[in-house]
Amino acid sequence: MGDLHGRTVESRAGVAAFLAGVWLIAAPPVLHFGASLHAFRPYWLSMGLAVVIMLLGMVRAMAPLDVPFIRHLTIVLALSLIVVALLRTDGGIATVWLNQLVVGGLVALSAGLALLLSLRR
């Protein structure tokens, strides 16, 4: 029964990370409404991190307990997304950076909670 609970918690955290990655990729065009290549230049690093977070979230959702190191990797990537949002030196819209800060914090929180719940078992 505990294994089923662990899989459910980890799978939900993976789905949350996947959806957060999808939103982070969609956020600059949705919030910025700039379609030029120059408009996406400030967001290339955070979009790359979002793609990796999305792919890791998909793996965590499909095989939640088979690759336990992904939890730690997701936390590190979410924290690096927060750092990128805090160190915004190359322009960009403040709304998009605030969105990345909040979503990165939520991904780190969900992965951290899944990690804590797995350590309790």
Image: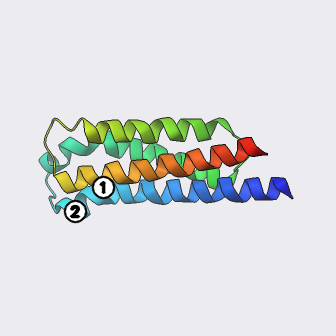
Residue 66 in view (yes/no): no
Q: Residue 29 at what x, y percent from top left?
A: 23, 60
Of residues 14 and 52, the one drawn nearer to the viewer in this rendering: 14
Q: Which numbered disc flags the more N-terminal residue, 1 or 2?
A: 2
Residue at 30 percent of width and 37 percent of height? 84
Quarter of the image that includes the N terminus: bottom right
Quarter of the image that includes the C terminus: top right
Q: Residue 109 at what x, y percent from top left?
A: 51, 49
Q: Residue 90 at what x, y percent from top left?
A: 15, 37
Residue at 69 percent of width and 40 percent of height? 67
Residue at 39 percent of width and 35 percent of height? 80
Residue at 48 percent of width and 50 percent of height? 107
Q: Amino acid at mark 2?
A: Leu
Q: Is mark 1 in CB contact (under 8 Å) with mark 2?
A: yes
Task: Give the image quarter of residue 85.
Answer: top left
Q: Which residue position is annotated with label 1?
A: 99
